[in-house]
Amino acid sequence: MRIRLSRLLAGVLLLSILAACGGATATTAPSGSGTTGGAATGEPIPLGVALAQTGNVALLGQEQVIGAKLAETYFNNKGGVNGRPIKLIFQDTAGDEAGAINAFQTLINQDKVVGIVGPTLSQQAFSADPIAEQAKVPVLGPSNTAKGIPQIGNYIARVSAPVAVVAPNALQAALEINPNIKKVAVLYAQNDAFSKSETGTFQNTVTATLKLELVTVQQFQTTDTDFTTQSTNVINVNPDLVIISGLAADGGNLVKQLRELGYTGLIIGGNGLNTANIFPVCQKFCDGIIIAQAYSFAQENAVNKAFREAYKAEQKKEPPQFSGQAFTGVQVFVEALTALDSKTKLNTLSLEQIREQLNTQILAGKYDTPLGQISFDPEGEIIQSKYYVAQIKMDETGTNGTFNFIR
Amino acid sequence: MTLTQFFQNVLNGLSIGSVYAIFALGYTLVFSILGIINFAHGSVFTLGAYFTYMLTGLAVGFNGVLATTKLPFALPFILALLVGSALAGLMGVLVERLAFRPLRDRGSDRLLSLVSSLGVAVIIVNVIQYLVGAEAYSYRSDPFGLGQPTVNFGSAERPIPVRSVQLVIFAVSMVVLIVLTLIINRTKLGKALQAVAEDTVTARLLGINTDRLILFTFFVSGFLGGMAGTLVATSQSITGPYFGIAFGLKGLAVIVLGGLGNIPGAVVGGFVIGLAEAFVPSQYVAYKEAVAFALLFLILLIRPQGLLGRVQVQKV
């Protein structure tokens, strides 16, 4: 009897796990007939989405999944690809390189997708993108902002503007708030390719462009949760501005511990902190963090208004950059597929031909997206006209916050 | 290094180390009785933090199948901490039933239970993520009502700040250490536990209900794990379902360093590793774990039984 009970419990737990896995890979079906009356029917076109749904990067990945699913529903309701719906196939990359490689291989070889939106981290892109390049499958990086991503290959492009272009805007905004900034402390996660790339841009802007004094550079790891040592090291040199390049959980904890130990100056957060998911980590201490943005929910075009409304209806808050960029990634695929299908019917092409011609089409097109008007240079780098800077404002309880656009 | 910096590093080390110590106490307890490593301890630690979160009446976030649900009541933080830890203790009992007892009943190799407990750990973490999502959670700010976020151990011009919540963790790990030591050395229950640790079969022949004592050990270990999870979460927030797993490896290092199964050793080991990390020069601070493990390696070369461990005499 005892053994039977434990077996039963084990069975229940196993079922929950299977359900959990099922949940992670499930896709949303196009919902209903929509309001436009032109909902897509017919055989769906499989598009791969490889994002971090588990692991510590899931904080960012979950925001991207929401954006991608909203795009799927939105464009399928508008008629999909000339009447054929797209079907997003999600593969979890988790937070590491091996997970990203597995997800890419499954999407390319088993799920036979026409293209891939992903992965979440630049760190993952450097190891997974070459696989897609070899298989000649177009990839759009929704949040890979490190230097050198589009240069991985012909099939690799990104809708996430590189950190070198976006990040310096935050420093300009900080100097507008406090023109007396002289001493700057920089902290970065040394085990993350993106954070290393971003801190390079920040440090270069501080010393070469703005001629400010870089008083200390501290390193940490994205898996760290205790930042006592780094925080006291920073406070000892008494900086006017602290710049942090890390991810959400570590970055949030760093801000919290820095503030608790007595730092009162301005803080700039990198793109890894660019999510409302840091609010529960640093709570009231998140207040005032300055973050450069490639997306603003206030951007005024029809597609962003529709995206913002759908996002708010579902999530009860304003859409963040990661969701906006993931939406854009899916949109670029849908519109490029539509343009391609209008030239040559997709069902007359083999999968290899679709992938190859789709890649050419992506780079040739212009897209009116939630990020504004975008296009690509021949290497696959995004050409985007406008960037923004936001400052976090926490409410009095320290549980909810907003990104206020200051630039 | 100035004197102020030295004291700051010492206090930083004790504050970092107290987190390791409080994690390792429940971990080492199971080892001291059963001689096995319970890899599920990190996930029970995580669960404890989530239980407390729910019991304080806060709602689940927007991800996971339980999104936005909350309990119909809200307990004060300290009560939620105790009830949450008790629930974690029950989870510890469940872990014993699922991962350890079936193997023990069959007389399997002890190494197998290492793997089965690892399996349970992975399952628990994934169930948590399925239910409540991967986002971070934190308690209402200042749950202990400490008022100020830091205590200054230096002067006004040369401050040596330590976060108040770290002092709470330090104090609790000390109290737990004393209570556990007293129970094991001064009570009948403790004597029975020692007998089980010495030889399970003989203890059973002497009329000790070993199964019940083992369950009790897992309950206490789970209780301590859950409490540690909550306390660490007040300092660092619950950074996601993987929150406790990160402490597993470090916790293992701590109990090996202190002497496997030695309860004061877990605390000493925690502080030694914390201090080693705190004294890593600032330009190498990202590599503090490598320094901590190098220290572990060196100490084991000199004292294979750990800092406070006794040499095991193998009787033939």
Image: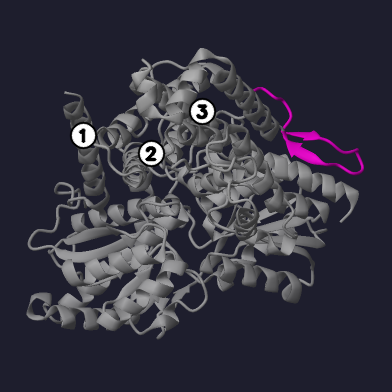
Chain ID at mark 1 = A
The Cα atoms of the two marked residues, 1 and 2, are separated by 25 Å
Graded by Cα atoms within 10 Å as few (under 14), some (14 to 19) or many (20 or more), the crowding at tag 2 reads some
As drawn, B54 above or below B36: above
Prevailing secondary structure class for the magenta stretch in the rendered image: loop
Viewer-nearest residue: A407 or B122 = B122
Residue that badge 2 annotates: B62
The reply to whether the magenta stretch includes residue B150 is yes
The chain containing the residue under callout 3 comes to B
Q: Which residue carries the number 3 mark? A: B224
On the rendered structure, is A365 left or right of B290? left
Give the alpha-carbon distance from disc 3 to disc 1, as whole Å: 26 Å
- Tell me if residue B289 is in the magenta stretch: no
Q: What residue type is labelled 3?
A: Leu
Q: Does residue A308 appear to the left or right of A162 in the view shown?
A: left
For mark 1, does the 10 Å Cα neighbourhood hold few (<14), some (14 to 19), or many (20 or more) residues?
few
- State the CA–CA distance, disc 3 to disc 2: 30 Å
Q: Position of residue B55 (x, y in %)?
A: 45, 22
Locate residue A107, reporting x and y percent: 23, 67
Q: In which quarter of the image is residue A163?
A: bottom right
Disc 1 element = helix
Badge 1 is on which residue?
A12
User: From what the image shows, is residue B214 above or below residue B109?
Assistant: above
B63 to the left or right of A261: left
For discs 3 and 2, the disc positioned in front in the rendered view: 3
The chain containing the residue under callout 2 comes to: B
- Magenta segment range? B144-163
Q: Quick check: can you spot residue A276?
A: no
